[in-house]
Image (cartoon, rainbow, N blue to C red):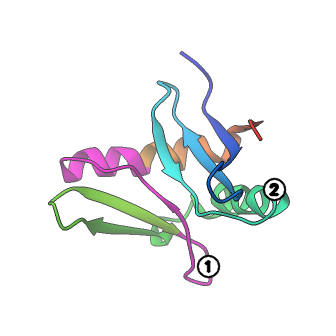
Amino acid sequence: MQNPKFQVFRSTSNQEFYYRLKAKNGENILSGEGYTTKQSCLNGIQSVKTNSQYDSRYENRKSINDQYYFNLKASNGEIIGTSEMYTTTSARDNGKAAVKSVAPGADIEELA
C-alpha cells in the first residue's frame, strides 16, 4: 500500500495543470479542473485540503447513465474537485469519506 497523495501533472493536449487525489490503494478518488499555472493547481489542492472537512461542501450527483459521483465545492460554491464514478450510492459515500479522511494530510507529488 502507498500513502494517499495528490499528483500534479500537465496535460500534453492543452498544457494545463491538473491534480488527482489517490487513495491508499492507488485508486483515483478526486480530480480537479485544468489550471493554467502550476501554482494555481497547488492552490486548488490547498482548497481541497481545507474544504474536504465540511460535509456541506459535498454535492451528490447522478450521471445520465445511472452512475453516482460527487463534487467538492469551495466556500464560494465553485467546484474544486469531482469524484470518480460509482455504481452505488454507498460506494459514492465511501469515496466521500475517503476524501475527507486522507485529503488534509496527503502529500503532493509533482509529475509535471
| Residue with the mark numbered 1 | 75
Q: Nearer the viewer, residue 43 or 97?
A: 43
Q: Is residue 92 magenta?
A: yes
Circle 1 Cα neighbour tier, 10 Å, few/some/many (<14 / 14–19 / ≥20): few
**Residue at (70%, 62%) from the top-left corner?**
44
The percent coordinates of residue 90 (x first, y second) are 23, 48
| Residue with the mark numbered 2 | 38
The picture quadrant where one finds residue 34 is bottom right
Could you say whether the residue bearing mark 1 is in a helix, strand or loop?
A: loop
Per the model, the C-alpha gap separating discs 1 and 2 is 22 Å
The percent coordinates of residue 21 (x first, y second) are 57, 43
Q: Nearer the viewer, residue 61 or 90?
A: 61
Residue 43: which disc?
A: none
Q: In screen coordinates, is 10 left or right of 98?
A: right
User: If the image is split into quadrants, where does the C terminus sit?
Assistant: top right
Extreme front residue here? 13
Extreme right residue here? 39
Circle 2 Cα neighbour tier, 10 Å, few/some/many (<14 / 14–19 / ≥20): some
Say what amino acid the circle numbered 1 marks: Ser
Extreme left residue here? 66
**Residue at (50%, 50%) from the top-left corner?**
30
The picture quadrant where one finds residue 59 is bottom left
Say what amino acid the circle numbered 2 marks: Lys
Q: In screen coordinates, is 56 left or right of 8?
A: left
Q: Which residues are magenta?
A: 73-96
